[in-house]
Image: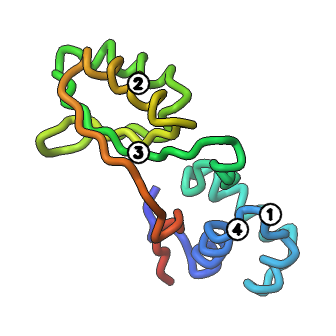
Amino acid sequence: MKKNQLDHIDRKILQILQKNARTPIKEIAEVVFLSSPAVSARIKYLVDANFITGFYTAVNEKAFDYHIKAYINVDVDLTDKKTFYPFIRSQDCVIECDCVTGEYSMMLKVMFPSTDKLDKFIDELQKFGKTETIIVFSNVVEHRGIKISD
């Protein structure tokens, strides 16, 4: 799977869907000058070929009482990763978890209704290693997808 397998129409479809995954097929078809069935077939190909890995809904976290967003760096020892991974996958508060370079080996994006719950979670994490927590005050750039050039 390589990006050069895609033509300019596929790239335009991806650009549109990244902005709004609910864009009607008919509307996409008008933009790319294809029939609706042709656009549907291209989207199916993009999914089957793993260029599209999912469709998501952005939810207002505060409407569900999640007022605390934070990034937690964790220094997980290589030997602890086999227990860390199942633990972290089971935690609903973890929105993302990435293995990273630098002083810490893991970076978590988490959401909580309160700092008390965040504090309790950090206590649980510290059994895996040293942590550093960064609490988010505001969001300057919303998730916007990657640049897909023609």
Give the CA separation, mark 2 to mark 4.
33 Å
Q: Position of residue 45 (x, y in %)?
A: 67, 57
Q: Which badge, 3 or 1, comes first in the chain's sequence?
A: 1
Instruction: Please name which of the two marks, 4 or 3, marks the residue nearer to the observer.
Output: 3
Q: Which residue is mark 4?
A: 20
Q: Which residue is mark 1?
A: 40
Residue pictured at 12% horizontal, 41% vertical: 103
N-term-proximal mark, 4 vs 1: 4
Sequence order check, earlier mark of 2 and 3: 3
- Residue 126 horizontal side relative to residue 16, left or right: left
Front position among marks 2 and 4:
2
| Secondary structure at numbered mark 3 | strand
In this view of the protein, can residue 55 be seen by the observer? Answer: no
Mark 2–mark 3 Cα distance, whole angstroms, equals 12 Å
Q: Earlier in the sequence, mark 1 or mark 2?
A: 1
Q: Position of residue 8 (x, y in %)?
A: 58, 81
Residue 17 placement: quadrant:
bottom right
Helix, strand or loop at label 4? It is: loop
Of marks 4 and 1, the one in the foreground:
4
Residue drawn where x is 56% and y is 77% of the image: 7
Res. 13 image quadrant: bottom right
Dot 2 and dot 3 residues touching (CB under 8 Å): no
Q: Identify the residue position indicated by label 3 in the image.
A: 70
Where does residue 60 sit, x and y in percent of width and height? 67, 53
Q: Secondary structure at mark 1?
A: helix
> What's the residue type where badge 1 is placed?
Ser
Which of pointers 4 and 3 lies earlier in the amino acid sequence?
4
